[in-house]
């Protein structure tokens, strides 16, 4: 029994000790978490302070810049007004001088232009007169040459025509003569053939041998006289 | 063998172109047989040449000192005879009527009497001549026919022709 009590007591003590240890561990964890949260909160508040300070400085700089700009703008407007007035005056003077100069130039140019026109008109009149005279002269000359060429051509054509006519006439006459001669030759040949045939049919075998012999011997004699047998 | 052949002893065989052609034909036959049969020339002449031409050819060979029993000499001799015969001058008489024997004799006599040297005669008949004669000799020609007279062309006109 005492042993069992002892074990029970010991078990209770051990249980109590374990529980105490566990509670202590939880407590430590919670306390650590809390300290971390506090440190973070502290850091954040420090950052917020820096940002607020920066915002404040920026607002001040902006306000200062706006004031400076307004000053500059007002000064610039004043300067611009003065410069514009001066420029306007200068331009006006320049324009007046220029207009005056232009007026003088126009008068001079007009006079020169009129003179030039007059001169050109005179030159044109003179040239026109010259061209008309020249044209008239050339026309007359060409007409003369043309007339002469036509006369020559007519004369040459007439001569050529006459020569050609003579040539054709001579050719025609020659052709007629040749034709006549050819026809006459044909007739002659036909007559000759006819005569020979007549002789042949009439004489032929009817020639007495004595006469034929004499004719042959006469042919030999004539040939000899003409030197046919000379070596 | 004498180089130049004298045909005087052969004139009887060479009176006309017809005769000449006959003799030349005989010579050609003799030469052909001589090379073909290789027989003695006497035998060939007696067998292939007409008598008395065969005997006269033998005499002609003797006259020219040609030994015709020798094939080479015979060939040379008969070749020379043939050449001489073919180079004889020929007088061609063309008549309108075929000549009678009497006319041929008359012409032959006239030729012997009037033309120097030997001339063979050749007779041609051309009916278109009618009568008279056309004479051709040595490349020259004369036409004295009745035909020529009737055409009215001068009969003395020279018309050289090749016979």
Image: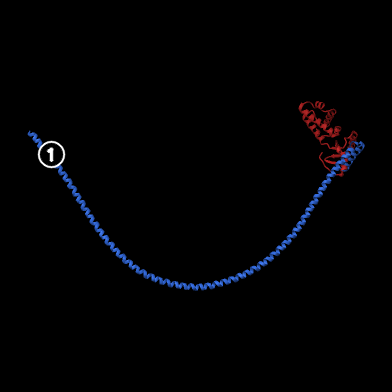
Badge 1 element: helix
Does any portion of residue A90 appear in the rendered image?
Answer: yes
Q: Residue A114 appears at what percent x and percent y?
A: 55, 72
Q: Quadrant of residue A210?
A: top right
**Whole-percent x, y for residue A196 in the image:** 87, 40
The picture places residue A88, in percent across and down from the top left corner, at 41, 71
Q: Quadrant of the N terminus of chain B?
A: top right
The chain that hosts pointer 1 is A
Using the image as rendered, state which of residue A208 and residue A164 is in the foreground. Answer: A164
Left or right side of A36 for B16: right
Q: Nearer the viewer, residue B94 or A94?
A: A94
Residue hosting label 1: A15
Q: Is residue B3 above or below residue A112?
A: above
> Can you tell which chain is drawn red?
B
Q: How many numbered discs?
A: 1
Q: Residue at x 60, y 69 (%)?
A: A124
Q: Quadrant of the C terminus of chain B?
A: top right
- The tint of chain A in the picture is blue
Q: Residue at x 85, y 42 (%)?
A: A190
Relative to residue B34, is residue A212 drawn left or right? right
| Label 1 Cα neighbours within 10 Å, binned few <14 / some 14-19 / many ≥20 | few
Point out residue A167 in the picture as x, y percentages from the top left corner: 78, 54
Residue at the far left: name it: A2
Q: Nearer the viewer, residue B113 or B93?
A: B93
Residue A46 vs residue B77, the one in the foreground: A46
């Amino acid at each position: 029994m005492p042993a069992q009590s002892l074990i029970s007591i010991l078990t209770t003590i051990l249980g109590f000790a374990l529980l105490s240890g566990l509670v202590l561990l939880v407590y430590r964890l919670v306390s650590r978490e809390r300290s971390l949260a506090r440190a973070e909160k502290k850091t954040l508040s420090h950052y917020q302070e820096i940002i607020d300070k920066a915002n404040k400085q920026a607002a001040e700089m902006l306000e200062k810049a706006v004031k400076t700009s307004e000053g500059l703008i007002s000064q610039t407007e004043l300067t611009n007004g003065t410069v514009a007035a001066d420029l306007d005056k200068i331009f006006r003077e320049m324009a007046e001088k220029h207009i005056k100069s232009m007026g003088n130039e126009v008068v001079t140019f007009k006079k020169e232009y009129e003179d030039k026109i007059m001169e050109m008109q005179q030159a044109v009149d003179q040239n026109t007169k010259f061209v008309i005279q020249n044209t008239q002269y050339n026309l007359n000359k060409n007409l003369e040459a043309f007339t002469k060429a036509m006369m020559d051509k007519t004369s040459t054509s007439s001569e050529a025509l006459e020569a050609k006519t003579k040539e054709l006439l001579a050719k025609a006459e020659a052709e007629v003569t040749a034709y006549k001669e050819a026809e006459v030759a044909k007739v002659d040949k036909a007559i000759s053939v006819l005569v020979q045939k007549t002789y042949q049919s009439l004489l032929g075998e009817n020639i007495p041998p004595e006469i034929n012999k004499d004719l042959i011997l006469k042919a030999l004699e004539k040939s000899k006289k003409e030197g046919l047998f000379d070596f | 063998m004498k180089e130049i052949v004298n045909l005087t002893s052969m004139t009887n065989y060479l009176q006309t172109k017809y005769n000449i052609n006959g003799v030349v034909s005989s010579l050609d036959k003799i030469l052909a047989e001589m090379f073909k049969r290789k027989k003695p020339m006497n035998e060939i002449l007696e067998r292939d040449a007409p008598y008395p031409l065969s005997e006269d050819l033998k005499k002609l060979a003797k006259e020219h000192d040609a030994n015709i029993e020798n094939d080479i000499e015979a060939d040379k001799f008969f070749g020379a005879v043939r050449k001489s015969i073919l180079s004889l001058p020929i007088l061609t008489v063309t008549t309108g009527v075929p000549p009678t024997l009497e006319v041929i004799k008359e012409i032959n006599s006239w030729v012997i009497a009037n033309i120097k040297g030997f001339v063979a005669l050749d007779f041609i008949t051309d009916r278109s001549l009618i009568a008279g004669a056309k004479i051709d000799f040595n490349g020259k020609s004369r036409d004295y026919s009745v035909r020529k007279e009737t055409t009215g062309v001068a009969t003395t006109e020279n018309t050289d022709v090749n016979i």
